[in-house]
Amino acid sequence: MKPKSLLALALCATLALTGCGSGASGPDPVKLLVFGAPEELGAYRTLIEAYQDARPGERVQLIEASDRKDLLARLATSVAGGAPPDVFLMNYRFYGQFAAKGVVEPLDQRIAGSTLDPADYHPVAMDAFKWEGAQLCLPQNVSSLAVYYNRTLFTRYGVPEPKAGWTWNDLVGTATAMTRDARGLVIKGTEAEGAARLPAVHGLGVEPSIIRLAPLVWSNGGEIVDDPVKPTRLALDSPAAREALKNLIDLRQAYGVVPSDAEVEAEDDESRFLNGRLAMLMTSRRATTNFRTITGFEWDVAPMPVYRQPVGVLHSDAYCMTTGSKNKDAAWRFMEYAMSADGQRIIAATGRTVPSHIEVSRSPAFLDPDQPPRNSQVFLDAIPTVRALPTVSTWPEIEDLSYGILENAIHRGDRLDDVIRELDVKSRPMFARGEHG
Amino acid sequence: MTASRPAPRIRPDTRARRQHLLMLAPYLVGLVGLMLLPALVTLALAFTEYDLLRPPTWVGLDNLTALVDDPIFRVALLNSLVFAVVAVPLRVLVALGLALLLHRRAPGVGTARTATLLPTAVPEIAYGLLWLWLFNPLYGPINQLLRLGGEHGLTVLGRTPPPWLTDPTSARAGIILMSLFTMGETFVVLLAARRALPRDVYEMAALEDATGWDVFRRITLPLMAPVLALLAVRDAIASLHFTFVPAFVVTDGGPPPYATTYLSLFVYQTGFEYLRYGYAAAATLVMMLLTVAALLVQWRLIRRYRRFYQV
């Protein structure tokens, strides 16, 4: 072989070796796949550091996805590629597609041989991650919807603040009284598009999604699917469900208290609240981290309005281990720590979660009176009444479908019968393809 | 004692061929490994049910028949076709117009050429985010500009400015508008082609007192036609892909119902968000067939055009 060829061969070999070699020593770190705001990612880094300090020799590598959809895509492709993360964090509404396909490792045996006691956690969150009777994931948090409100604006306009036990009509009345123009006069937002007086403050912000609609329907005594255990369609045709849906649509179409679609596109509801241009916002605990950056006004949370009985919708994310993990024992040790009181306190400090650990959720780590919202107890009071949405494997598709239909209903004013029929007809094939736990 | 055999002499053309092959090798390896093989595997997966998580199972033509009945796919297909039919000619026309305008040396021409090319150099995601701001219905500079001279948030004609991201037609127009500014490559090729045209032909036309339109129709257009046709073919193929980032970043496939969901976004969402990879592969197969069909149609048009000018 000529010297030049030998040199080329040696160069290629060197490149291949340096390209493939990790250069790291010791056992592989536990790979943790999450997504979240910078503050949340910071909390995971703190959690990992605390874990590594508490357990010398253990290593955890944080893999950051940009959002929920990116996380789903990364998880699916890494599983297909044979190199999945060891642990991932996922909401119960979206884990069904992975649970049904055997991607998530059952944890019952590990729990039985561990110091981790399931009785220490809120049962509703633990149950949401059971698939065919097996505990697949460990819930990190247990949130529900609440109404965040700008206290300073309420004081300025002399409108009574929302309080426990308020009704849907109270909400509409309050939102109407809080929708104001730049001079501080009450204004009807429906007349504002393209007209002289645009609302400077909107009374309420609410996302046109099934997860926002569900607790209202349930509270009114209706259902959102035909069979909560094995659903086959979105069924909003009962009188109770119709009424709740119509009332939600009327917020924009009849009362104009929620921003128009153009206004939402120009500035989303969370930013609008942050900038003091939204009196109330219906959202989960997740928004707290962002709202704690507010310095210009005071804010707090109130429970959801009630129709007939108080019912909340479960928001919960959990640590799940992949069946393809090559580092299961180390992954479990990290999950145990993250679920322990110490681990939950670290994440609770961000304000983003309502801890699933009962003791931590009742401790100052969550109910710290010096940190807004003052009334965090609202989230704990809601736990006994929260219900979970179906965990059918095709739920992500169903949520995307319903979002578009509900968005058009609220902002374009589609006929109620058409909306209900469209949700029913278009969701059927998706439910039919789904697998249930 | 054995006499050493002389080394076989390599003919110069054989050596040159080997060198060419060696230089081409990295590209060929990439082409086969990263394009052709995945494409073949994807085509095979189009006939399976595959969710990325469990092994694929053979379903024959089920995915393709399901696509026919899928209203979201039909909308995505129509959106892609409309985009190709409207945006491709517009992009080539704008690039041609600018190339003809900027092929001469004149003050400011260099800056104008750079400005034309610049959007192509911006990373796609950054470009999408920029337009997200430009299209902002209330605070975006485009609508602010349109409101100049008008009252109560209306334009000077008393109309509401386009609700770019909330109205289906405006959103589709917005995606086309975005694509017009990234025709830098087409512009450069056309600029080079125009500058390479023989001067004496134009001098003769000037002697004959030919009008500008005559010069364009009888000289410039026929001479540049092969390049234009090539660019149109390339753009038609690329149009199936370059709608992805704008639809993904700026409109998220909306406004509902699926106003800017193009085939590329449909494939991504179906495959990676809903884990219906086999079904997404079937939609990809349709995209490939469309590309082949577009190529054949344009190839026939080009042949007819050449025959016309050869007569």
Image (cartoon, coloured by chain):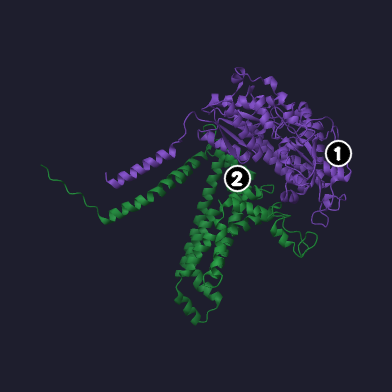
Chain colours: A purple, B green
User: Circle 2 sits in a helix, a strand or a loop, which is it?
Assistant: helix
Q: Chain of mark 1?
A: A
Q: Is residue A167 above or below residue B23?
A: above
Residue position marked by numbered label 1 in the rendering: A161
Front residue of A370 and A311: A370
Q: Is residue A261 left or right of residue B2?
A: right
Q: Is residue A121 left or right of residue A170?
A: left
State the image coordinates of residue A102 (x, y, percent, origin top left).
57, 28
**Hey, what amino acid is under mark 2?**
Phe
Residue position marked by numbered label 2 in the rendering: B266
Q: Residue at x 51, y 72 (%)?
A: B105
Q: Residue at x 45, y 45 (%)?
A: B36
Instruction: Determine the image quadrant of residue A173.
Output: top right
Q: Is residue A242 above or below residue B307?
A: above
Q: Is residue A112 above or below residue B227?
A: above
Front residue of B248 and A101: B248
Q: Badge 2, how many Cα within 10 Å: few under 14, some, many 20+?
A: many
**Hey, what amino acid is under mark 1?**
Glu
Q: Chain of mark 2?
A: B
Q: Quadrant of the N terminus of chain B?
A: top left
Is residue A434 visible to us here? no
Is residue A14 visible to us here? yes
